[in-house]
Amino acid sequence: MGKSKKEKLYAKKRFSLALMKKQSMLLMMSVPFLIWLIIFKYIPLWGWTMAFQEVKPATFALCMWERKFVGFDNFVKAFTDRIFAQTMINTLGISIIGLVTGTVAAVIFALFLNELCFTKFKKVTQTVSYLPHFVSWVIIASIAKMIFNDGGAVDTFFNTKLHLMSSNSPLFWWIVNIIEIWKECGWNAIIYLSAIAGIDTTLYEAAKVDGANRFQRMWHITLSSIRPTIIVLLIMNIGSALNVGMERQMLLSNSLVQDHAMVLSWFAYVRGIGSNNYGLGTAIGMFQSVVGVILLLIANKIAGMVGENKLM
């Protein structure tokens, strides 16, 4: 005779308590992280109230209930701004290109690095590949300008002016993401290499006996085994699609490409801090966060519907 719903719930509760007791040390180790998360991630959300108020330098020191409440006026000002539409297009364009090219580049790099037979060369290559991750964007931008600017290394090599960094077109999005791939590809590949390291080696041996060549083993075993990791990282990256950092664009852009360089983070900085309208800047930041959460939930739901691993 099957258990009743009450008995099943009681058994599940006992299992949960037993599991918590068994993993008590792990739970205690997570307490500092939870404290950090609450202090630096959740308590600052109280600042979102500024998005519904008129907050200027003169009123910034006032208490929340002493500031002028303006409702959704800050959001209306942001959405009706003359450059908001182009800023959204730039943000989505740079984000989508970066999401696709960055993921593909990191996965391919991890796959081929895993196939290297010379262990020492493999370690040196991996170390060199993720070193640019620790280099400041100021230095990276200076090097990139010497290479891609008019009269730079690329123009000298092709003996013509390609206008890569001065073309007022979406070409700037591709240049930014090419530089981003060079900087972050090695670092992003680390997690894929870790997932590859956990694959059962007997699968490769069995496939080799069955006559599978190296590329077939890479496709059917390696890539298939790390697919859940790729999906989870994709979901997380989709959630941050609108949170494109402004450092790259600020350092790489110029007056000629400004129309295609402005992203939401930069827009929030210019309209918020630059114009001394902190409420407007907060409204833009809040819009980014809310849309990011919605995109994360949608991507997670789609992943579950097509039978892939979900983030939650």
Image (spheres, rainbow, N blue to C red):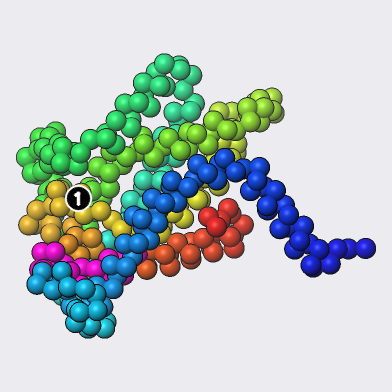
Q: Residue at x 27, y 35 (%)?
A: 134
Is 260 rendered above or below residue 30? below
Q: Position of residue 79 (x, y in %)?
A: 24, 76
Q: Residue at x 14, y 48 (%)?
A: 251
Q: Quadrant of residue 170?
A: bottom left
Q: In the displayed image of the protein, which residue is found farthest to the right?
A: 1
Q: Position of residue 111 (x, y in %)?
A: 47, 33
Q: Position of residue 94 (x, y in %)?
A: 28, 56
Can I make out residue 277 in this image?
no
Query: Label 1, on which residue?
Result: 247
User: Which three-letter amino acid code belongs to the residue tagged 1?
Assistant: Glu
Q: Residue at x 40, y 56 (%)?
A: 38
Left or right: 80, with 43 as reference point:
left
Is 166 rendered above or below residue 83? above
Can I make out residue 29 in this image?
yes
Magenta run includes residue 197: no
The quadrant of the picture occupied by the N terminus is: bottom right
Left or right: 126, with 270 as reference point:
right
Left or right: 219, with 173 as reference point:
right
The residue segment tinted magenta is 270-289
Left or right: 56, with 50 as reference point:
left
The quadrant of the picture occupied by the C terminus is: bottom right
Magenta run includes residue 283: yes
Q: Residue at x 45, y 51 (%)?
A: 34
